[in-house]
Amino acid sequence: MDTFGRYYRLTDWGDTHGEALEGLIEGCPAGLRVDMDFVTAELNRRAPSRAELSTKRQESDHVEFLSGISDSVTTGEPIRFRVPNVDVKVSEANRHVIKPSHASYTYMRKYGITDNELCGRASARQTVCRVVAGAIAKLWLKDRGVRITSKVLGIAQPAREGDSVGALVEGRIQGLPAGLGEPVYDKFSARLAYAMLSINAAKGFEYGLGFKAAEMSGSEYHDIQNPDFSFRTNHDGGIQGGITNGEDIYFRVAFKPIPSVRYDRETIDFEGNPVMMKGSDRNDLCVAPRVLPVVEAMAAMVVMDFWVM
């Protein structure tokens, strides 16, 4: 069981090998009309497809709301939901091998787990819960004029058929008022980075001009304002001093290649013996484009969390 957020809060449990993933959303005000078609559409964006880079595992990702919503309107009570797993298969060949660049080794050291079937919380399948909570947050924010979008900036080229690849994703938050975020430890930028880096396979985050700013002078970088306080540029990416300034927030997230590939790979087992990890088509070869609704969901939860605070 894991929790994200302080005031608008998601707690979820379950894993990729179980009967279902379930969650509890707290802090959603009463009276929000939940467009179920929109929630379904967001889940469909994250769901497996027939695309070449997508997993052959097929899940309908149908969400069942168990409490907190009555006649499609939030009641103010915690919203409990359930997303069943329907296509569960455990790879006996890979159950006891350490998957390279995966959670296998660290779960063994932290929890004593030597069976990959028990590492299900590390699976990107968990992100279905984030998308549910994010969809409701996006509906609440839409009523306040906030729009959250994302796109794939680039995907690495595989050197071998069946290999996995990394990706770079851009997110954008439009329509935010100035004043969200705290000035020291709870900066809006810090919470946004925390949210993005909690996504499976995320390895890097930047907002505004990001790392490019390290190569610039102040005179090049400064976001000069006009007498009416409008900005001539937005190098800061909508956040100054950890607080939103009313400009668009734009950010980028770098994702590593997914650990599982579709050909056999040398590794070791949990006792340190050299073995081969069997290739599988039950995993995506790239997080994109399925990660886009996850990025947007995490951004929406950060915004709503600060807003209801």
Image: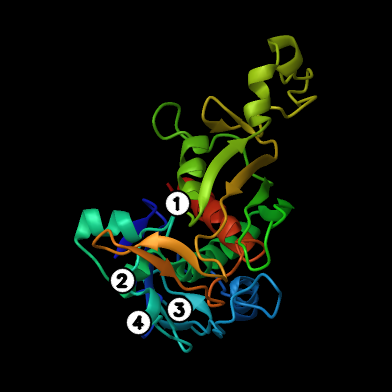
Q: Nearer the viewer, mark 3 or mark 1?
A: 1
Mark positioned earlier in the residue sequence (3 or 4)? 4
Closer mark to the observer between disc 2 and disc 4? 2
Q: Secondary structure at mark 4?
A: loop
- Determine the residue positioned at 53% across, 84% down: 62
Whether residue 280 sits left or right of residue 238 in the image: it is left
Q: Position of residue 22 (x, y in %)?
A: 37, 76
Residue farthest to the bottom, as pictured: 86
Disc on the earlier residue, 4 or 1: 4
- Badge 1, how many Cα within 10 Å: few under 14, some, many 20+? few
**Mark 3 vs 2: CB contact within 8 A:** no
Which of discs 3 and 2 lies nearer the camera? The answer is: 2
Outermost left residue: 112
How far apart, in angstroms, are the residues tagged by discs 2 and 1?
26 Å
* Along the line of sight, the residue nearer the viewer: 102 or 303: 102
Looking at the image, which is closer to me, 261 or 208? 261
Residue assigned mark 1: 198
Q: Residue at x 60, y 46 (%)?
A: 254
* Badge 2 amino acid: His
Label 1 SS: loop
Which image quadrant for residue 164? bottom right
Say few, some or many: other residues with alpha carbon within 10 Å of mark 3 (under 14 / 14 to 19 / 20 or more).
many
Nearer-N-terminus badge (3/2) = 3
Q: At numbered mark 3, what does the secondary structure look like: helix, strand or loop?
A: strand
| Quadrant of the snapshot with the N terminus | bottom left
Instruction: Please state the horizontal and vertical placement of residue 137, each as a whole percent of the image.
Output: 54, 61
Amino acid of disc 3: Ile
Identified by mark 4, the residue type is Gly
The residue under label 2 is: 96
Q: Quick one: label 2 or label 1, which is nearer the N terminus? A: 2
**Residue at the spot of label 4:** 18
